[in-house]
Image: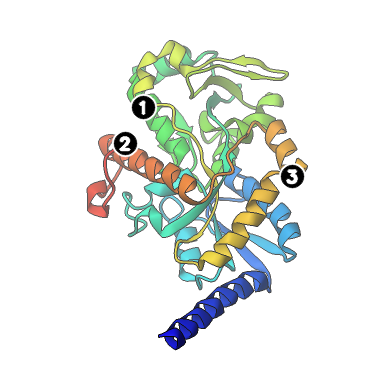
Amino acid sequence: MKRILFISLILLLGVATGVAMAAKGYPQRNITDVVVWGAGGGTDICNRIIMAEMADILGVNINVINKTGGVAGSVGMSHAYSQPHDGYTLCGLSESNVTAGVQGGWDKKFDVWDTFIVGGSPDVISVTPDTPYKTLTDLIEAAKKAPGSIKASASGAGSIHHLNLLAVENGSGADFNFIPYKGSQDAQNAAMTGEVSVVVTSLAEQQQLLRGGKLRALGMLIPQPFEMEGLGTIPSTFDAYPGLAKYLPISQAIGFAVPADVPADIKAVLKDAFDKAMATEKVQTWAKENYYLLSGKSGAESKAVFDALESNFAWTLWELGAATIEPSKLGIAKP
């Protein structure tokens, strides 16, 4: 009996030592971060900031690439998920990706990922300066009088920005002509070139255009107004249209993920690097200057956030008539 216990102890120690050695040996080569949205957008910039800090901590390069397209980032997610689940391929994503399943672009629940949340910035609805809309009421009432006549961009179908636009329509009675683009940067460029008159993206993404007078902010898609240095107060859309409270606010959760079945010791190394990167002065300063609210959640905390987002987003899209697959068919419970 003692011999069996001794052998078992040796085996257990061997496994523990092997895990420790695996963790100590990772990473041994460069890592790739596949961002599912376009270059220059919020998810892209956020990933490049955090990956630069994590690369210094891990002692390897982290190459950030963009793979856009599909439905709600499904092309990039599918590519990242198809790679070996060994910690050398990360997926730069956001809350918007949780709708890929109900829109037919992804055949899995979102819990196949383990996520790391950097943070997010609140959405704002803005117009180009050449439009006659000086207030949110001007815009909404014009959209009511001539349904479908006002073109609006909000990045890809199923993104948080698209969902926020749908919420504005349903909470106010407006009807816009939604034009989807690959990412927030493309959506904002469309406003600059006159392809659309209205754009819904985050304050972080719009800030330079707002400061340069290329966009005019009409309202924050959160219950509170927002004070922006140099521009004054951007009112809450809830003030003019209380009905928006039924659909809003919907918050961003930008970061990255690895497949959930990546070895635990590798995820522990990534978590350690992530936690240290989040605490760096560079990340803290960047967030403050760019209107980001930092999160830093990972593991069970992050999973809880994305589970709630998936449930909320998926069923909201279904109820708004913007989903092709009923969420329950994917095992997504109602909120």
In this picture, residue 152 sits left or right of residue 23 = left
Q: How many labels does the image show?
A: 3
Q: Nearer the viewer, mark 2 or mark 3?
A: 3
Q: Where is residue 103 in the image (x, y as percent from the top left)?
A: 33, 50
Mark 1 or 2 closer to N-term? 1
Mark 2 or 3 closer to N-term? 3
Question: Which element type, helix, strand or loop, lies under badge 3?
Answer: loop
> Label 1, on which residue?
247
Residue furthest toward the bottom?
3
Question: Which element type, helix, strand or loop, lies under badge 2?
Answer: helix
Q: Position of residue 244 (x, y in %)?
A: 38, 21
CA gap, disc 2 to disc 3? 37 Å
When the figure is inspected, residue 175 is found, relative to residue 4, above or below; the finding is above
Q: Residue at x 68, y 62 (%)?
A: 62
Q: Which amino acid does label 2 sit on?
A: Thr
- In this orientation, which residue lies closer to the viewer: 223 or 140? 223
Task: Locate the C terminus by quadrant.
Answer: top left
> Label 2, on which residue?
316
Residue 175 can be seen in this image:
no
In this picture, residue 57 sits left or right of residue 13 = right
CA gap, disc 1 to disc 2? 8 Å
When the figure is inspected, residue 92 is found, relative to residue 197, above or below; the finding is below
> Label 3, on which residue?
280
Q: Which amino acid does label 1 sit on?
A: Tyr
- In this orientation, which residue lies closer to the viewer: 224 or 24? 24
Q: What residue type is labelled 3?
A: Thr
Q: Position of residue 79 (x, y in %)?
A: 48, 65
Mark 1 or 3 closer to N-term? 1
* Mark 2, other Cα within 10 Å: few <14 / some 14–19 / many ≥20: many
